[in-house]
Image: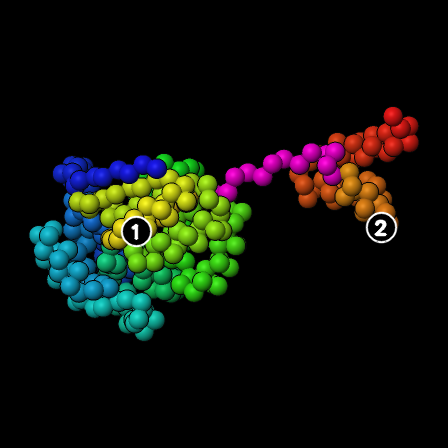
């Protein structure tokens, strides 16, 4: 198991890109904007411009918005309204009205990209269905950041968000994911992390590789790698705090079936009245072996039984 502490680094310089998120003059739009997940140095010039020019700012928490704008040294001129999980459904109609009137509605989550385990999806869905302009100011994402630093395969992955809190529902979800071959990314609250890691170990096996990424881009960033058994033990050693993403390796590829191990299945179907070629085809398709190879293997096994040793 390996632990990597990481301190804040000075923000890297970025190349200025002209223009902001604005569409054609007078065209209303929904702008989904990614905000820093920890380090304010990750804020893009386009985010700063969007904050300054948006007509309406739909935010989860107005206090977070004030801290963000103060930290970036920008001033907003638009109307600020709250837009969070408890009132999202009721806000959609109001925000769509603003877009229809030609206004730019900037959607912000507390951290990261809106719509990813955060408000914004319902508005984006409704606006897109109506043919209104939906665009984005790309920015930091805890999902992609955790995946990138995990050291686990990134060519195919799935984001699973938060697991259910009830143990029975959580077990059912993990049973569905038992054979998932792609790398999986989860979110979890600190006080439920040990319970979650234990459930992952029980569902996926003690030796499955995983990573806990904590406080990404912040002063006390920590990336802990190991097997699920090792991570459960690490978590039990002390109180874990901060924003957490858990990255889990996908299930290993199943061992390839051998034609000689499938002869019995084919013969069972034949005994039930299925033609040999059809029986071999069914079993071959299900197991991933070649139909002709399996058919010839069955014939060879029959011949061996007849001739004997």
Dominant secondary structure, magenta = loop
Instruction: Report the disc number at residue 172.
Output: none
Asked whether residue 151 appears in the rendered view, the answer is yes
Judged from this view, the residue extending furthest toward the right is: 306
How dense is the environment of label 1, judged by Cα within 10 Å: few (below 14), some, or many (20 and up)?
many
Marked residue nearer the N-terminal end (2 or 1): 1
Q: Is residue 71 left or right of residue 166?
A: left
Q: Which residues are magenta?
A: 250-262
State the residue position of label 2: 272
Tell me the SS state at disc 2.
Answer: loop
Q: Nearer the viewer, residue 296 or 222?
A: 222
Instruction: Report the disc number at residue 244.
Output: 1
Q: Is residue 81 left or right of residue 164?
A: left
Q: Nearer the viewer, residue 164 or 181?
A: 164
**Residue at horizontal 30 percent and vertical 71 percent from the top:** 86
Instruction: Name the spot of residue 61 as percent of width and height, x first.
Output: 20, 64
């Amino acid at each position: 198991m390996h632990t990597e502490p990481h301190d804040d680094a000075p923000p890297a310089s970025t190349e200025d890109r002209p223009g902001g998120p604005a569409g054609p003059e007078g065209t209303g739009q929904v702008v989904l904007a990614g905000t820093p997940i920890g380090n304010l140095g990750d804020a893009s010039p386009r985010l700063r411009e969007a904050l300054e020019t948006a007509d309406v700012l739909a935010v989860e928490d107005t206090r977070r918005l004030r801290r963000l704008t103060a930290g970036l040294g920008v001033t907003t001129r638009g109307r600020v309204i709250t837009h969070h999980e408890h009132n999202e459904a009721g806000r959609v109609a109001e925000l769509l009205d603003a877009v229809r009137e030609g206004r730019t509605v900037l959607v912000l989550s507390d951290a990261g990209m809106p719509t990813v385990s955060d408000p914004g999806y319902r508005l984006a869905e409704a606006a897109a269905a109506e043919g209104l302009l939906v665009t984005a100011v790309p920015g930091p994402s805890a999902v992609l950041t955790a995946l990138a630093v995990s050291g686990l395969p990134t060519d195919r992955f799935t984001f699973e968000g938060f697991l259910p809190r009830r143990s029975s529902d959580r077990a059912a979800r993990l049973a569905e994911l038992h054979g998932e071959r792609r790398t999986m990314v989860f979110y979890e609250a600190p006080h439920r992390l040990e319970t979650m890691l234990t459930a992952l170990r029980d569902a996926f096996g003690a030796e499955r590789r995983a990573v806990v990424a904590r406080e990404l881009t912040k002063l006390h960033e920590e990336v802990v790698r190991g097997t699920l058994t090792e991570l459960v033990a690490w978590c039990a050693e002390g109180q874990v705090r901060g924003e957490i993403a858990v990255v889990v390796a996908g299930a290993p590829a199943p061992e390839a079936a051998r034609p000689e191990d499938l002869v019995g299945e084919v013969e069972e179907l034949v005994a039930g009245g299925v033609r040999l070629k059809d029986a071999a085809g069914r079993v071959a398709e299900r197991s991933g072996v070649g139909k002709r190879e399996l058919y010839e293997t069955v014939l060879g096994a029959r011949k061996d039984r007849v001739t004997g040793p």
